[in-house]
Image: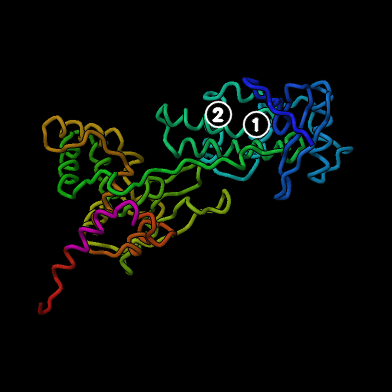
Amino acid sequence: MKTKKPKKNAEPEKKPEFQRSRTNLFRRDNGRYYGRAMAFGKVHKKSFGKLGLEEAKEAHRKWMSQIHGWNYEVGSDVPKGTTLADCMAECEKLCLAENISYDHRRYIRSRFKFIREKWPDFGRLMPDAISAAEITSWIERMRTEGFSPATVKGSLLYMRKTFAYAEEHKVLFANPMLKITAPAAPPRGGERRRLSVEEFDLILTEMRKMKLPACRRAADLAELLAATGARLSEIAGKKTSNLPGLRWRDVDWENKQLTLYSAKGRVSKGKVGTPRLIPFHPRLVALLEKLKERSHTDETKVAPASTAKKSLFGAVKRLHKAGKIKFEKLSHHDLRHMFATWAIESGIDIPTVADLLGHRDGGALLLSTYRHLRNEHLQNAAKKLKGKA
């Protein structure tokens, strides 16, 4: 049997190229539409023949319903032509309808607002007209613009909820977020500002130099935060989270300890929070005795002020200008880190420090954040080992 020899200089036949019309629907140059999708761990393929675009979309919709086991006759319970903006609006309503704190509501609104502002075309698209590659490209663009991994990760969480809403209401057949992974945060070890006790005493002295009584009260609040390692809301209280703050009834002079209530882990609004005990130490006792002279009724707050932000900022700025400290800014939360650093450098083990700070991970976060301090502590401990060489 004779076989035809290929002609010399003959151009190879070009295979028809695929053009993506929508998610899982492709069109070849010959005008035929094809579907390719995964359902229940299996890849499905389907040829729809030469059809118009709208006819191919309808055939593709029925095929997707069939392989996923959905009842196409029932259809979606949302209007036809629903965009991602509509899905986002409904998803935001559902998230805000839950029994959550004021801060959580504000965070949810900020994440949806971030998506709308940083991806204006996102809301105009149909749920099945966006691919995982486009979402990945947006993530890279946000990272290039300097947004932190936590900001991008939080936005992706509510973007994921939006696509889940669309999938649940049968306006999306292939969820592109299944292939998306959130950006990992950089290692935190050694990044925290190390505020020594000596530097903190300089700041307190600078704050108490001011003649205004408010500055002195702010200095007492700052010292109370640093001596307990507490969050500002645990000491001064927070109405939106229903936290009363530290009151004199929470100070147990007999057992030498005080009780702090945290908004972390609250079940619902109206419940006070998770309590934890802080034992007395010499610096804390001296400060409490000083504050008790001013007001000591059981319902009175121990903290003499609700914030020390402005006074801290002014004192740190003056000391930095005089060349006495190296940093220019200091926040309430930095005082919490100072307490953790102080406790670890004093030889207290990591799990105990985690309990004092109210962490529930047994010290995993502290190990990653203060690993450099742990290594220094181990070096000093090794020097104390005695034995014959």
Magenta-span inclusion, residue 371: yes
Residue 127 placement (x, y as % from top left)? 69, 30
Location of the N terminus by quadrant is top right
Vertical side of 175 occupied by 382: above or below: below
Residue at the far right in the pictured view: 73
Q: Which mark is residue 263?
A: none
In the rendered structure, the answer to whether residue 159 lies left or right of residue 324 reads right
Q: Amino acid at mark 2?
A: Ile
Q: Residues within 10 Å of mark 1 (few under 14, many from 20)?
A: many
* Nearer the observer, 177 or 148: 177
- Give the residue number, with chain letter if any, for mark 2: 115
In the rendered structure, the answer to whether residue 383 lies left or right of residue 176 reads left
Residue at the location (82% across, 46% down)? 69
Marks 2/1: CA–CA distance: 10 Å
Residue at the location (41% across, 43% down)? 185
Residue 192 placement (x, y as % from top left)? 29, 45
State which tag comes first along the sequence, 2 or 1. Answer: 1
* Nearer the observer, 212 or 342: 342
Residue 212 placement (x, y as % from top left)? 22, 33
Q: Amino acid at mark 1?
A: Met
Vertical side of 258 occupied by 96: above or below: above
Q: Residues within 10 Å of mark 2 (few under 14, many from 20)?
A: some
In the rendered structure, the answer to whether residue 190 lies left or right of residue 266 reads left
* Nearer the observer, 236 or 389: 389
- Give the residue number, with chain letter if any, for mark 1: 88
